[in-house]
Image (tube, helix red, strand yellow):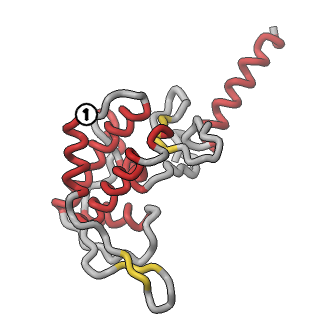
Amino acid sequence: MSREGKPYRFDPGALCLELLTTGGPGAYARWEVLYEPADLAAWADRSRLPDGLDLAVDRADVERARGLRDALFLLTADRAHGRPLRPAHLDVVNAAAAEPPLVTRIEPDGTRGWAPGATGTRLLSTVAHDAIELFTGPYAERIRECGAPDCRLLFVDTSRPGRRRWCSMEHCGNREKVRAHRARRAPEMD
């Protein structure tokens, strides 16, 4: 939802970046939505993970999710702005990745399913593995912060040309185009 209450689609481009929309460190804590185990399970259901995950989550998983999310938030912002990645934040991601991840399997009907034993710890490991792939892979240099001056959403630009500037064209991109159009027309009005 936008500040005006209008829904819009925001695709950050990676599973690990989807976790960033659940709150964050410092001033971003006001957006916190991970309070209970059910909140983390609901996030997993809305994420880009395939459907059918029967996830067992406890309160400790929620705390670990918030810690991982905050470390990822700061790492992603540092990467988007060309700053060095801080070792303490990398340690959080690497510790989560050291745990066993979620296990997928092929079902008898040929679809993807989940092996039994899906836990919050395995979910966070999967998110951390996704972050490692993003930060060390071909899109590492395409991690961005929305170009709107009043938006701080972080995303990876997976577009073919690699010139995405906005969290969403329907929201910030459109607002910035309207502002630029009005600014160009202002001299004509005088």
Residue 118 position by quadrant: bottom left
Residue at the spot of label 1: 86
Q: Give above or below for 42 relative to 179.
A: below
Q: Could you say which is closer to the camera, residue 112 or residue 182?
A: 112
Figure disc tally: 1
Query: Where does the image place residue 53, in percent across and percent down from the top left?
Result: 37, 75
Q: Give above or below for 82 relative to 7.
A: above
Identify which amino acid the numbered label 1 is placed on: Arg
Residue that appears at 30% across and 64% down: 123
Q: Could you say which is closer to the camera, residue 151 or residue 75?
A: 75
Residue found farthest to the top: 190
Left or right: 23 as drawn, with respect to 177: left
Left or right: 184 as drawn, with respect to 58: right
Residue that appears at 50% across and 29% down: 150
Mark 1 is surrounded, within 10 Å at the Cα level, by few (under 14), some (14 to 19) or many (20 or more) other residues, namely: few
On-image quarter of the C terminus:
top right
Query: Where does the image place residue 49, in percent across and percent down from the top left?
Result: 43, 66
Residue found farthest to the right: 188
Residue that appears at 59% across and 43% down: 168
Left or right: 65 as drawn, with respect to 105: left
Label 1 element class: loop
Q: Give above or below for 137 relative to 82.
A: below
Query: Where does the image place residue 149, in percent across and percent down from the top left?
Result: 52, 26
Query: Where does the image place residue 68, in percent across and percent down from the top left?
Result: 26, 49
